[in-house]
Image (cartoon, grey):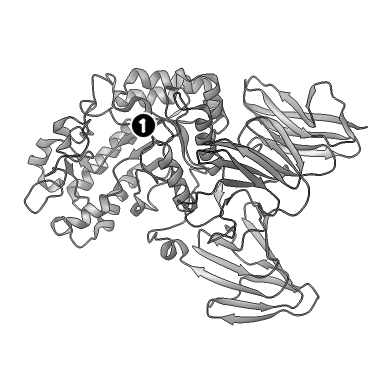
């Protein structure tokens, strides 16, 4: 057992604390309680490794946050957790600049510490786990994907029209990527029979894929492309280079099916071929490795794509394992064979280009920056269930092992506005990879507004480091935010997954906050909900509400902004109050052309003394305008009376 990871251990009564080693950690005896600093764990996060008594509440963090509900600290780099057990336990996070986060642990009596090593590798089934390197991608990508509106009908003109609109309307909000999906290659249509990645559909992309990448980049966006690199549909290549491919025992291809696919909407010839492709590359073959290298040098170096989404990856390791004896190198099991091919791809792409694995390709951990965690979504309540379920099941991996991709967000009609708001809010509050997928230039204003408030992806990490309950879906997602120079607050998403109205109740204890009086502001409705200790809110069926929660300070106080669903986590630079001048002031990062609203709560006994501030009950609103993105100083003057 290593040395105890605590320093400056002190009993509350000044007496010495006795430390005993146990088989799994340590036991600290202190009759009157103790306080100690946690040694190491500089990249640690306060968390839980298992649900608490209230399974309705899901905690997430933005910054160095604390919660009375947490009983553990997890270090992604060490893949090790410390679990604390004691009465009156409190784990407090204290930011230490670039050096990371330090923690102080206190309790009201004896404390047991359990060390859980190899948490992701052994306890969460990720043997290839390694802590995500976020140097070049400090946040998940945010952008647009062509698939869920255009499907196989995407073409050069529509890529350009959507790029123009995104550059004009959402780029300044943090929308960065334009990703072209299936339909650019081969003859532009078809499934398993249309997987020749070295041929571009001249009918739909007459100027080629390099032209599209260059056009996207000229508009200030970054280009992305979809493909299935481990498959091919070129029959001549299959005949002339058999060493490239995986073969069945009878000499045929695993992609040629004995029974047709059960998709009546597919042409008959497509149903006889695996949708991913007719022929599968043998990633252990030097010839196939050379092929993968050439393919990605073409896509990335010659064409200029900086983001590649590779599809049909979930079954690749199993396919190689099933045909292992006939691989060029049968000494490699399925996962190692698959990772050998991925390694070639990532080596060509380098660390500054984003590789998205789609879908459930968990064997790719450590080689891909992002992984699609669920099935395809659709434009309906039923269609968004894969995004909801995969978020619940795999959110605990986001930002730790890779960026989780719950698939795109669609907000267009005929999806009801409340369901579109729920979908956008869920992805916005969980900090996952974000891609819109509508015909952007036809969206009405109220639908565009949903997207403005979730770009860019906020720097949010999980605090529940385990799969959430899929059967009894939790409905309260509590994002705890701590920003130096601004303050600490919670943004809570209240989700009703059912078909009847539901009343959800928030209290400080339920959110792991200290007892006291709080101010609650409804983000989407832009109104003060109330001040107190208990908030009960009705949520309509298949809808949500987003509420920010602030500790009441007994004077006029900052309670968020309209810019982003996190109510200031990205845009509020600093906030201060002067007792002498009775002025609340701050600095904000404002989006050009977007009315920026600063909200302040004004308690009884105070009034606004500025003519440019509007009062809505006890909520003061100051609207700022700027032609271009940049910082703006603001202030509100108050008087007693």
Any part of residue 556 in sight: yes
Q: Secondary structure at mark 1?
A: loop
Toward the right, the furthest residue is 641
x, y (%) of residue 224?
38, 33
Total tally of numbered discs in the picture: 1
Residue 90 sits above or below residue 295 on the image: below
Place residue 616 in its image quadrant. Answer: top right
Mark 1 Cα-neighbour bin, 10 Å: few <14, some 14–19, many ≥20:
many
Q: Nearer the viewer, residue 445 or 473?
A: 473
> Left or right: where does residue 469 sit relative to residue 268?
right
The residue sitting at 75% across, 29% down in the picture is 633
x, y (%) of residue 581?
90, 34
> Left or right: where does residue 179 sit relative to residue 227?
right
x, y (%) of residue 284?
21, 53
x, y (%) of residue 108?
73, 70
Place residue 197 in its image quadrant. Answer: top left
Residue 89 sits above or below residue 415 on the image: below
The residue sitting at 53% across, 29% down in the picture is 451
Q: Nearer the viewer, residue 621 or 292?
A: 621
> Left or right: where does residue 432 sit relative to residue 345?
right
> Left or right: where does residue 213 sit relative to residue 550?
left
Quarter occupied by the C terminus: top right
Residue with the mark numbered 1: 304
Place residue 51 in its image quadrant. Answer: bottom right
Residue 292 sits above or below residue 144 on the image: below
Any part of residue 133 in sight: no
């Amino acid at each position: 057992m290593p040395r105890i990871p605590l320093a400056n251990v002190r009993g509350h009564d000044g007496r010495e604390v006795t430390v005993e080693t146990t088989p799994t950690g340590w036991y600290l005896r202190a009759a009157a309680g103790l306080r100690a600093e946690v040694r190491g764990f500089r990249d640690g996060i306060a968390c839980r490794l298992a649900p608490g008594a209230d399974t309705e509440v899901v905690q997430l963090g933005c910054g160095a946050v604390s919660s009375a509900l947490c009983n553990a600290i997890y270090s992604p780099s060490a893949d090790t957790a410390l679990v604390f057990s004691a009465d009156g336990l409190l784990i407090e996070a204290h930011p230490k600049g670039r050096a990371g986060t330090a923690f102080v642990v206190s309790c009201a009596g004896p404390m047991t510490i359990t060390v859980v090593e190899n948490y992701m590798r052994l306890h969460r089934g990720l043997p290839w786990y390694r802590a995500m390197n976020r140097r070049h991608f400090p946040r998940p990508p945010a952008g647009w994907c062509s698939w869920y509106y255009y499907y196989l009908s995407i073409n050069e003109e529509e890529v350009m029209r959507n790029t123009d609109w995104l550059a004009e309307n959402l780029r300044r909000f943090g929308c960065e990527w334009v990703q072209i999906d299936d339909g650019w290659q081969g003859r532009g249509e078809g499934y398993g029979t249309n997987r020749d990645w070295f041929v571009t559909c001249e009918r739909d992309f007459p100027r080629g894929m390099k032209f599209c990448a260059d056009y996207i980049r000229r508009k200030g966006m970054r280009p992305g492309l979809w493909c299935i690199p481990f498959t091919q549909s070129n029959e001549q290549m299959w005949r002339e280079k058999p060493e490239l491919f995986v073969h069945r025992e009878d000499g045929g291809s695993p992609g040629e099916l004995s029974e047709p696919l059960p998709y009546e909407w597919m042409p008959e010839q497509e149903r006889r071929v695996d949708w991913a492709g007719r022929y599968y590359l043998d990633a252990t073959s030097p010839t196939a490795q050379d092929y993968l290298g050439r393919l990605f040098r073409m896509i990335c170096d010659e064409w200029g794509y900086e983001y590649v989404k590779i599809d049909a990856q979930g079954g690749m390791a199993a396919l190689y394992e099933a045909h292992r004896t006939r691989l060029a190198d049968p000494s490699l099991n399925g996962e190692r064979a698959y990772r050998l091919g991925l390694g070639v791809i990532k080596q060509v792409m380098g660390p500054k280009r984003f590789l998205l694995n789609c879908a459930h390709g968990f064997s790719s951990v450590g080689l891909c920056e992002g992984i699609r965690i669920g099935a395809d979504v659709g434009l309906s309540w039923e269609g968004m269930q894969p995004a909801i379920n995969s978020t619940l099941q795999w959110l605990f991996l986001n930002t730790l092992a890779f960026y989780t991709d719950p698939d795109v967000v669609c907000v267009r009609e005929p999806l009801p506005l409340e369901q579109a708001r729920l979908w956008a809010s869920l992805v916005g509050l969980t900090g996952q990879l974000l891609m819109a997928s509508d015909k952007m230039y036809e969206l009405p204003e109220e639908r565009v507004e949903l997207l403005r408030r979730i770009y860019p992806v906020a720097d949010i990490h999980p605090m529940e480091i385990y799969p959430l309950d899929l059967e009894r879906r939790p409905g309260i997602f509590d994002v705890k935010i701590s920003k130096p120079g601004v303050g600490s607050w919670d943004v809570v998403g209240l989700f009703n997954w059912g078909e009847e109205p539901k009343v959800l109740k928030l209290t400080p204890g339920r959110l792991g906050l200290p007892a006291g009086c709080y101010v609650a502001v409804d983000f989407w409705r832009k109104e003060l909900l109330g001040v107190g200790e208990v908030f009960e809110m009705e949520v309509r069926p298949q809808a949500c509400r987003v509420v920010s929660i602030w500790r009441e300070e007994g004077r006029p106080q900052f309670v968020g902004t309209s810019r982003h669903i996190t109510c200031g986590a990205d845009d509020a630079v600093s906030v201060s109050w002067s007792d002498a001048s009775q002025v609340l002031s701050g600095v904000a990062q404002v989006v050009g052309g977007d009315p920026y609203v600063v909200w302040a709560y004004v308690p009884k006994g105070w009034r606004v003394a500025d003519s440019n501030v509007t009062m809505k009950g006890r909520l003061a609103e100051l609207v700022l305008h700027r032609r271009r993105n940049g910082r703006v100083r603001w202030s509100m003057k108050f008087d007693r009376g």
